[in-house]
Image (tube, rainbow, N blue to C red):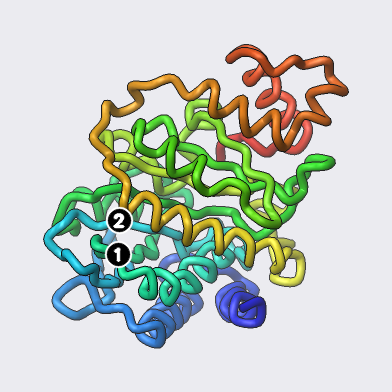
Amino acid sequence: MIEQLRTDVEQLAVPGGRLPGTPAHLAARKYIIARAEQEGLEGYADGSFELPYAEGDIRLTNVIGRLPGLRPELPPVLIAAHYDTCGPTPGADDNASAIAIALSSVEPLRKARLDRSVLFAFFDAEEPPHFLRPTMGSTYFYEHQRREDIHCAVVLDLVGHDLPAPTLENALVILGMESDPGLEGVVRACDPSPGLATLVTLNRYIGDMSDHHIFRINKRPYLFLTCGQWEHFHLPTDTPEKLNYEKMVHIAAYFVRATIGVASAALNGPFEGYDTTETELYFVRKYAKQIADLLGNPLESRTDLESMVSLLASEGGLLTGR
């Protein structure tokens, strides 16, 4: 599995980046479609994977595939990873790592024989100048190209590197559990996760830093999986050899379990209508107690959680927006 993850990242993370309108952007789209076909996905738009749209002279294209479920009439789960880059950067971690992990999940999810279909959304135009604008690929899909309700979105971004925080290098940060009470059971059921320390926190602490934005503002359940920002974020040094592919294997396994969990969970709301403090404390106590003890943080309250988040943000830029 490591070799396929590495191959996908290396094929996508080329010098000069994947800016919309460039040859590398087109090549990346063709590669993703070829891999989606290889994995046996169906095209979303009347058999086609490509859902084009435009801003001025720039043509943009979302790539959407479907893994049919046993009950295709049910609203599908959507999993997402954007494929453009911010400027002329290779984008190994932003976001080739997420694309590779999403593609690796097709076969395990097929074997799970889910009732719900799963949409594999490789969104265009996530990066500036489209970020949080109507032309952002996920926003355009949701508002203009979507053909059905979405049961839950599971979004990947920046999932290939070690966290820049001592003793938490193997951590994966989970946001969005607060979007529906049914997600609490999913996140707890995914723990323990071999090879990973999972930290669960509120999306409001960092803001909408990726494609989950459009689902949140439309009050759809979502989970956002990330390792946060790091020293190579949006820089020419974001290259394939710097990623931790063993960690990516563990994240891929977690991602599959989480997707299976949300597919079978009853997500009936209320949206952001329950208190997640105890579950957040459970994960921080389990995986970050060493740091908390050094700081004299008792990890007993929401205030204590906010202090930990502030520390992670200041130490490594982990929980910061774009």
Using the image, determine if residue 192 lies above or below residue 94.
above
Q: How many marks?
A: 2
Q: Nearer the viewer, residue 100 or 257?
A: 257
Work out whether residue 161 or residue 72 is closer to the camera in this orientation and state it.
72
Q: Quadrant of the C terminus?
A: top right
- Residue 133: percent from the left, percent from the top? 34, 43
- The location of residue 84, given as percent across then percent down, is 47, 63
Q: Secondary structure at mark 2?
A: strand
Residue located at (75% from left, 71% from top): 241
Residue drawn at (53%, 62%), measured in percent from left and top? 98
Dot 2 amino acid type? Val
Q: CA distance from mark 2 to mark 1?
A: 10 Å
Q: Residue at x 31, y 70 (%)?
A: 113
Q: Position of residue 13 (x, y in %)?
A: 61, 72
Report if the CB atoms under discs 2 and 1 are less than 8 Å apart: yes
Q: Which mark is residue 235?
A: none
Q: Label 2 belongs to which residue? A: 77
- Find residue 114 and name its label: 1
Question: Is any part of residue 61 visible from this angle?
Answer: no
2 or 1: tag closer to the N-terminus? 2
Q: Quadrant of the N terminus?
A: bottom right
Q: Quadrant of residue 76?
A: bottom left
The amino acid type, in three-letter code, at marker 1 is Leu
The residue shown at (47%, 49%) is 128
Label 2 neighbour load within 10 Å: few <14, some 14-19, many 20+: many
Residue 256: % across, % down? 47, 61
Instruction: Specify whether residue 79 is in view.
Output: yes
Query: 213 and 124: which one is in front?
Result: 213
Q: Is residue 90 left or right of residue 74?
A: right
